[in-house]
Image (spheres, helix red, strand yellow):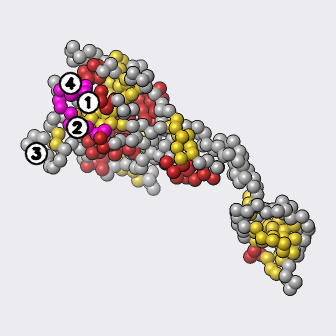
Amino acid sequence: MRTEIASTTGRAEASPPVDWEDARSRAYAAGREGALPAVERPLAETDGHTLAEPLTPRTDLPAFPTSSVDGWAVRGAGPWRVVGRVLAGTAPGPLTEDGTTVEIATGAMVPVGTSAVLRVEESRRTSRGLVDGVPRPAPEWRHPGEEASAGEELLPAGTPVDPALIGLAASCGHDTLRVRRQPRAALLVFGDELLTAGPPGDGRVRDALGPAVPAWLHRYGCQVAPADVVGPVADTLAAHVDALRTALTHADLVCTTGGTMHGPVDHLHPALAELGAEYVVNTVAVRPGFPMLLARLVGTDGRIRYVAGLPGNPQSAIVALVSLVAPLLAGLIGRPLPVLPHSTLAEPIAGRGDHTHLALVRLDRVAGTAHPVRHVGSAMLRGLAGADGFAVIRPGTSGVAGDRVPVVPLPLLPGERTW
């Protein structure tokens, strides 16, 4: 469900917060609605993208019988007379006579008429120069289609492209892949109180989100050019509207930091109303980070664009990224909504009443346990820097040591599969 944004003639009252799981689902559905088009890319340029169509081989894999050992391709009973040599990359003639053999290299095409392949280390030469030995009972070659048949679906659309997939695609005979265009994102930093260089002081704080959010977006598969990071934007409605309108001309997603409440210098909601946006989500019942939002706009070109309002407190902003932006982007690029992994709490974690609590944790992947970290206030980033993700503590509950709980993992590399 989407809600029209109130007029700027009066300050809108905050709507009831959306349940965290519902908000995540709404964000994903919004991304699916505006899914980005498929594009053709050379293999070398597809890492981190997402398959727009299933990956299928152009031929059987392997396409022809290939020797799995160095040795002798023989016909009939031995000993065998040597009549040639077959190397990888050549198309040999057939073996037409019993008692003959050709030397064969690993990966070379097995000649028609071959009855067995004798390993070189299990062969010997007779005094007359013939090859002798006992081939093993099992064939020493790979059969056509042993790995896959031509046209067989190997990986579905929506699969993240990584080096292993690129190698598989090349082995299937592909020079290019149909992938989803990567989203282009922009970041607008709101807040006259922010410093962009040097230490904080005299009532002003250092902007931590301007440098960090583009890196997070990059890890979620977005393209963020340096010119698309703007701010601090002046604390006026006109400046907010102008900055949003400019960013939306070229970005699929505009993230903003701060201004998501309804205070006297919080201009995001009125700016979105002036631009004709509608809410996908307006505030989420999650702590920290509840005053987050996601809105959509339809441009004159008919394309849907999105604005994600991240709270100004740094950890709260990252909670908004994992809660709304990550599922939105998954939908935009055609990936499934991630199923959250689970881990066992090593220590208790307090609940947050009727709100979901996203608690920063460090994961012990050997033991399969999640350990809460310190320094986790909304304005703090120290705990985030040592964490692997957020443990999800459901509304109305507390986490008890030994509980199995979902974990929202933080991405480590651009386009990786954790989300």
Magenta run includes residue 234: yes
Q: Are marks 1 and 2 in contact (CB under 8 Å)?
A: yes
Q: Residues within 10 Å of mark 3 (few under 14, many from 20)?
A: few
> From where the camera sits, is residue 96 visible?
yes
Mark 1 or mark 4: name the one nearer the start of the chain. Answer: 4
Image position of 115 with respect to 281: above or below: below
Q: Which residue is mark 4?
A: 238
Q: Which residue is mark 2?
A: 231
- Observer-side mark, 3 or 4, equals 4
Please state the horizontal and vertical placement of residue 366, each as a whole percent of the image.
Answer: 45, 56
> From where the camera sits, is residue 405 visible?
no
Q: Secondary structure at mark 1?
A: helix
Please state the horizontal and vertical placement of residue 364, each as a whole percent of the image.
Answer: 41, 53
Q: Secondary structure at mark 4?
A: helix
Mark 4 or mark 2: name the one nearer the start of the chain. Answer: 2
**Residue drawn at point x = 25 percent, y = 49 percent:** 382
In screen coordinates, is 412 left or right of 176?
Answer: left
**Residue drawn at point x = 20 percent, y = 37 percent:** 232
Q: Which residue is mark 3?
A: 201
Quarter holding the C terminus? top left
Mark 3 or mark 1: name the one nearer the start of the chain. Answer: 3
Q: Nearer the viewer, residue 102 or 261?
A: 102
Amino acid type at image mark 2: Gly
Amino acid type at image mark 4: Ala
From which residue to which does the magenta span run? 228-244
The residues tagged by marks 1 and 2 sit, at their Cα atoms, a distance apart of 9 Å
Q: Are marks 4 and 2 in contact (CB under 8 Å)?
A: no
Q: Which residue is mark 1?
A: 243
